[in-house]
Amino acid sequence: MKATRRIWRSAAATAVLAAAAVGVVGGTGAGTASAAPVALTVNYTCLVPLQGDHQLTVRLNSDVPASVKVGQPLPTIAFTATLDFDDDTSLWFFVPDLSYSIEGSTRVRFALTAPEFPSSVPLYSDFTMTSTPFPPDGSTPVIPANGVLHPMTFRQPGTGRISLDKDLEQFTLRFRDPNGNLLDVEGDGKYALPFDAPCTLNPGQNTLLASFDILPA
């Protein structure tokens, strides 16, 4: 198998976490409770071209305020995450006797529900994967990542909830040599060929990341 087949990406483009149909504003504002840590672990099944299904575990961590007042912004929510592929996937990525690192980005879709959005609105997150050396023994790398949710304001009191929603809309990996150059795996100037590898959220999981109170002004 040619090494280029080890380099793959999924369907769309990377993005910044943005609120749809919600007021997006700057600053943290007053009337917001102290943030509390939240964590969520979910599993996806990714269809790798010519290889079949592989498992991807995503662990999310953040701090989300317990409450916010109507008209006051919910502050920026910064996410840290790790992405961990199953052992079979590492066999597909691994190139023996070659020193290189993996980096990339992925789009994660969240759903926001609130009194003014009872049917939920989507939130999209661009997660950037930090450059991570591929272990020389061929074991599976655990890739750190980070993303943000921009400030939002609400117009009605009640309860807000942020959950993971649907599938990873995009997954892109890049491979670099020790000098930071994109890895030219065939020596012909062609760095990385794109591969579609859609990742589907496995059913039956808890997808609620955080809930918070929206208090009267």
Image (tube, rainbow, N blue to C red):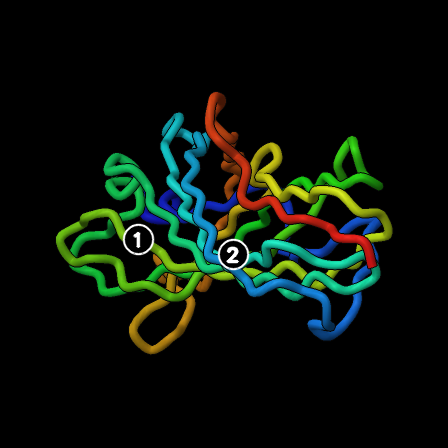
Taking the image as shown, residue 74 lies to the left or right of residue 144, namely right
The residue positioned 67% from the left and 64% from the top of the image is 32
Q: How many marks?
A: 2
Residue 147 on image: x %, y % = 55, 60
Q: Quadrant of residue 161?
A: top right
Figure check: 208 above or below 31: above
Residue 158 place in picture, x, y as percent: 75, 43
For label 1, the residue is: 142
Q: How far across and how far down the image is residue 72, in percent?
A: 78, 64
Horizontal side of 27 relative to 93 (left or right) equals right
Q: Outermost residue, top direction? A: 204
Rendered position, 113 above or below 178: above
What residue type is disc 2 on? Ser
**Which residue lies under the disc numbered 2?**
105
What is the secondary structure assignment of the residue under circle 1?
A: strand
Classify residue 6 by image quadrant.
top left
- Name the residue at 80% across, 39% down: 115
**Does the rendering let one see residue 200?**
yes
Tell which of 81 and 93 is nearer to you: 81
Residue lying farthest to the left in this orientation: 137
Q: Helix, strand, or loop for circle 2? A: strand
Q: Is residue 104 left or right of residue 183?
A: right
How many C-alpha atoms fall within 10 Å of the one at disc 1: few (<14), some, or many (≥20)? some
Amino acid type of the residue that numbered disc 1 sits on in the rendered structure: Val
Quadrant for the C terminus in the image: bottom right
The residue closer to the viewer here, 129 or 93, is 129
